[in-house]
Image (cartoon, grey):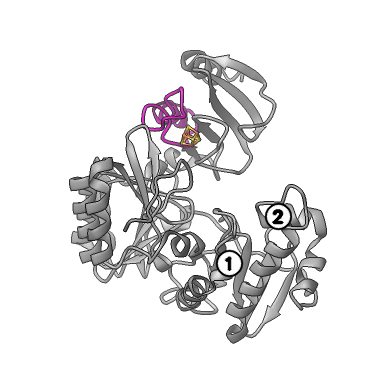
Amino acid sequence: MSETRIRGWCPGARRPMRSGDGLILRLRVTGGRLSPDTVRAIADLASRYGNGELDLGRRGGLQLRGVGDHDFGALEIELAALGLLDGDAGAEAVRNVVASPLSDLDETAQGDAFALARQLEAALVAETGLRSLPAKFGFSVDDGGRIGLTEVPADVRLRFERNNVAVSLDGDVRTVMLPPEETVAIALRLAHTFLDLASRIDPPPRRMAALVDHVGAETLFASAGLGMGDISRPNRTDAAPLIGAFSVHVGVGLPFGRITADQLLFLASLAATDIRLTPFRVVLLPGVSADVLPRLADAGFVTAPDDPLLAVVACPGAPACATATVETRGLARRLAQLKSSHRGIWLHVSGCEKSCASSARHAVTLVGRDGGLDLVLDGRPADLPRHAGLSPEVAEALFRSGTQ
Ligand code: SF4
């Protein structure tokens, strides 16, 4: 365990991040699938070593918060015993794969995303030449069914289409069609090509979309020995259809991605088979019937797909994050109630420009700066604000009067 270092960004279980409420450890769970016993064990660890609060991230990782420096070593030993710790920090970092959560249960799925994700993770860990990939460089494996991953950040995208897998690069809509058995090797080749081409640019692009901007997808595909394919037809991604009761699962939303150890224990007590984490801040219980929904709502989960809280995102903000100078989630909760129904996310409250909660453009973004809030319309936290240095009260009044 001696190689573990505490870093200031992109947390893992091997490489935690320091925040305002202690260390954050992110668990990368293959395909997001956890047994009820493992969920109980994680809840126990979160209570004993952390502050009992966890976050479900935008790539489906589960973060334990509030871990003390002195507890970190013992926590690592217990995570290893549960099979939740990679061999080293490099292996953990490169194993950055998101998969469709229901490919074994969704009758519209066109392939087994879980199996392909598992193969890809194993290959990435074994390929030590890819350890220099940027920390956020990641892959998605979409089963081609009703739960699309097109809005989940990924540098290399794999999507089952009939009997093949469509491979595409972030920043370009075109695909190359491959037989499934060739997909893992090609995904690795594209990652090597990324490293090679990025290293020739000063400064090197850190994400695939930036490299595609520089050299074009044709060059990337050709350098990896591939020809260009047809224009792809991305399938839809939306958290809403996952929430509620369906024929094969019950789904609940987590406001701002936050879940407590007690809530995890409650989910484990209801599970029929396993518990599935998704990159949509939604947790799924396969094989569970609709009659549990009222109890899940009482336990603080979002159970209605039109809940206004699903239309806002906010990072932890102050005091949980040491970088933040403003409180974020209380404000987002209050503002969420001002729009009773809204499709998609209309509001992003970010404690600073880093944009941990969302990298997308939103109709309204409030971003903390030096204790005040800047208001950006139709943009991202780093964009030019329409108003700067607002107090939370003034920002809220602007929304209530509709004059933002
Ligand atoms: S965006 Fe939020 S959570 Fe991320 S560093 Fe800034 S204040 Fe912290």
Q: Which of 116 and 329 is in front in this view?
A: 116
Q: Is residue 338 magenta?
A: yes
The image shows residue 388 at horizontal and vertical percentages of 61, 17
Side of 338 relative to 265 (left or right): right
The quarter of the picture where residue 86 lies is bottom left
Q: Is residue 16 above or below residue 189?
A: above
Q: Which amino acid does label 1 sit on?
A: Leu
Residue at the image point whose x is 33% and y is 63% from the top:
85
Q: Which of 301 and 360 is in front in this view?
A: 360
* Ligand 1 within 8 angstroms of badge 2 C-beta: no
Sequence-wise, the earlier of marks 1 and 2 is 1
The quarter of the picture where residue 285 lies is bottom left
Q: Which of 310 and 321 is in front in this view?
A: 321
Residue bounds of the magenta highlight: 314-340
Name the quarter where the C terminus is drawn.
top right
Q: Is residue 70 above or below residue 29?
A: above
Q: Mark 1 points at which residue?
A: 130
Distance from disc 1 to disc 2, alpha carbons, whole Å, reads 18 Å
The image shows residue 162 at horizontal and vertical percentages of 61, 82
Q: Name the residue under label 2.
A: 209
